[in-house]
Image (cartoon, helix red, strand yellow):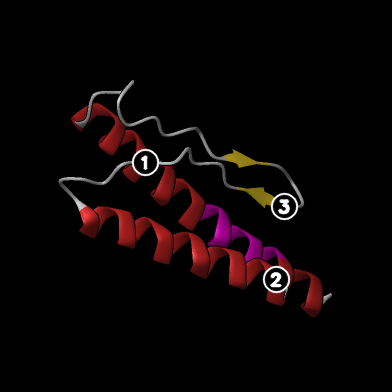
């Protein structure tokens, strides 16, 4: 039972990170021309987290691009470990 609670808690934490990242991407979408900087929605299903982002030209904001890459990498690694 304890293992189940731990897994559930780990999944909740990842889901929260997913929600935070989605909010961040939504904010970016508002701040940039949506056609010029297409950012696809993240897809979250009960067992896996699938992240889909179109190629984005970060001409003005390389920092945001790196932030998103790092965040996605961290979430992906967390999922692979579990």
**Tag 1 residue:** 56
Determine whether the residue tagged by mark 3 lies in a helix, strand or loop. Answer: loop
Front residue (pair 48, 33): 33
81 relative to 10, above or below = below
Q: Which residue lies furthest to the top in this view?
A: 35
Report how far apart the C-alphas of labels 3 and 1 lie in the structure. Answer: 24 Å
**Earlier-in-chain disc, 3 versus 1:** 3
5 relative to 49, above or below = below
Front residue (pair 32, 57): 57
- Coordinates of residue 51 in the picture (x, y in percent): 57, 47
Q: What stretch is highlighted in magenta?
A: 8-16
- Coordinates of residue 11 in the picture (x, y in percent): 65, 61
- Coordinates of residue 53 in the picture (x, y in percent): 49, 41
Please, what is the dominant secondary structure of the magenta stretch? Answer: helix
Report how far apart the C-alphas of labels 3 and 2 lie in the structure. Answer: 10 Å
**Tag 2 residue:** 80
Q: Which mark is residue 48?
A: 3
């Amino acid at each position: 039972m304890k293992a189940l609670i731990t897994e559930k808690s780990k999944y909740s934490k990842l889901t929260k990170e997913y929600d935070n990242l989605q909010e961040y991407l939504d904010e970016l979408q508002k701040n940039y021309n949506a056609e010029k900087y297409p950012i696809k929605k993240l897809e979250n299903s009960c067992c896996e987290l699938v992240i889909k982002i179109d190629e984005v030209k970060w001409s003005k904001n390389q920092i945001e691009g790196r932030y998103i890459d790092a965040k996605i990498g961290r979430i992906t690694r967390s999922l692979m470990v579990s």
